[in-house]
Amino acid sequence: MIARKCLGLCRHSAPSGRGKLCARTYSTSAKRHPVHPEHLCESVWSRVPKGPMDPILGVTVKFLADSAPNKLNLGVGTYRDENGHSYVLPCVREAEARLHQQDIDHEYTCIGGAERFNNLAASLAFGETSPLILNRQIATVQTLSGTGALHIGADFLKSWLPNLRYIHYSTPTWGNHIPICLGSQLEPKRYRYYDSVNIAIEEDNMLEDLNDAPSSSVIMLQVSAHNPTGIDPSRELWKKISEVCKTKKHLVFFDLAYQGFATGNTDNDAWPIRYFVEQGHLPLVSQSFAKNFGLYGQRVGALHVATANPTEAESVKSQLELIIRPQYSSPPIHGARIVSTILGDPVLKNMWKKDVRHMADQIKNIRQLFVSQLKQAGSTRDWSHITKQIGMFCYTGLKEEECRDLAELYHIYMTLDGRASIPGISKNTVGYLADSIAKVTHYQ
């Protein structure tokens, strides 16, 4: 017999049965699993509840657990080839080959990331000839993709705007915006954006909400290829949004996650940022290179904070680095090197622009084919909004129960609000998808 002590939290720990380690000794044999003589002792983690599954990434978890050969994942926004594999851009392949030939090391980068990457990233967002670029008025740090940029930005706002309580988001917005906001101890506020009946932006209501927000509020605006609706403001509406924000002295926080995926032209897709700067705004910009470079797993992004002068920019960057240091010390370098290699070489940069245009055009083609196949499948519902929307995502209009039926009956997975990733559809799968949707909607 071997004498052992119980090291778990159990009812012998204290009268309440919580909070202290049990010190009771029990006996056991080597042939038998140690069991408390009266009950099984609890682990220190026994009262930790299982967290809810992420509404977007959880789709992939369910998809991977499905053994059906005809399953289809329309949850996560990744551009895929005809075989459903993640697409590697030709310019990225070439950049990787060049980096391999240079025999580079894997040394740490600076807390704020590689300076060359930061400069090229800022130029891509604001434009090479932007006065903010030329006058060194932008504080830029490399981040863990767009999610990291949003989080670092929210932490910075909370630290240096002590009276800040809210960040205002569109209704609806990307699912991770709200948790990021709450994680920085800020509260999400909604402004009206999407009219589900007319499949359009609620322009008047949106402007009214922005105008009614307290002066000097932080307004989150998605620059292009709005996630999840696929509907962007027109340039005329952007001008009205800028005027309201300027009048109310709102601080604009742009989310630039899909530059190039809206129109196929990276300069066109960044136009709202550049227009706002022309109008005197000093925005924050969260920038992601996951989608438009296909570097999903490399986590390449940047946060830009526009300031009034170079001295402010230096101070702001130093404070951003103080936020980064205890969180992850410094960002990963390989993906940033790929982006820098491409953007810093005129030939590779032109190749990249063609790659982006190709992906944007393919997404448009799939949208048209999708609608055509739905009609051929016998559906009489109006699906024209699918071709009117832009970017990676489509707000299909499918109801929650219809989305559940697609998953349970036909192994097709998307978020329950009916958002589908268009690049997840190929010419090989669009027919099956259309037939399945026609069935769950009873051919409406």
Image (tube, grey):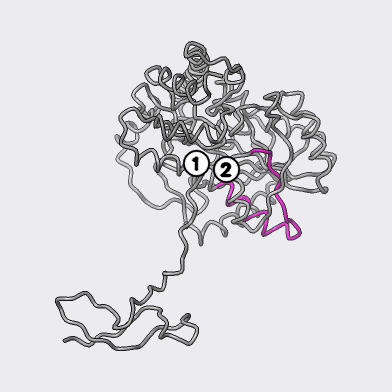
Q: State which region is magenta.
A: 149-172
Whether residue 371 is visible, yes or no, is yes
Q: Position of residue 437 (x, y in %)?
A: 48, 23
User: Disc 1, disc 2: CB below 8 Å?
Assistant: yes
CA distance for labels 1 and 2: 7 Å
Upstream in sequence: badge 1 or badge 2: 1
The label number, if any, that marks residue 56 in the structure image: 1
User: Is 318 situated left or right of 201 in this image?
Assistant: left
Q: Position of residue 347 (x, y in %)?
A: 44, 22
- Badge 2, how many Cα within 10 Å: few under 14, some, many 20+? few
The mark tally for this picture is: 2
Q: Is residue 151 magenta?
A: yes
Identify residue type, mark 1. Ile
Task: For the C terminus, give its image quadrant.
Answer: top right
Q: Is residue 276 above or below residue 220?
A: above
The label number, if any, that marks residue 175 in the structure image: 2
Secondary structure under tag 2 reads: loop
The residue positioned 32% from the left and 82% from the top of the image is 38
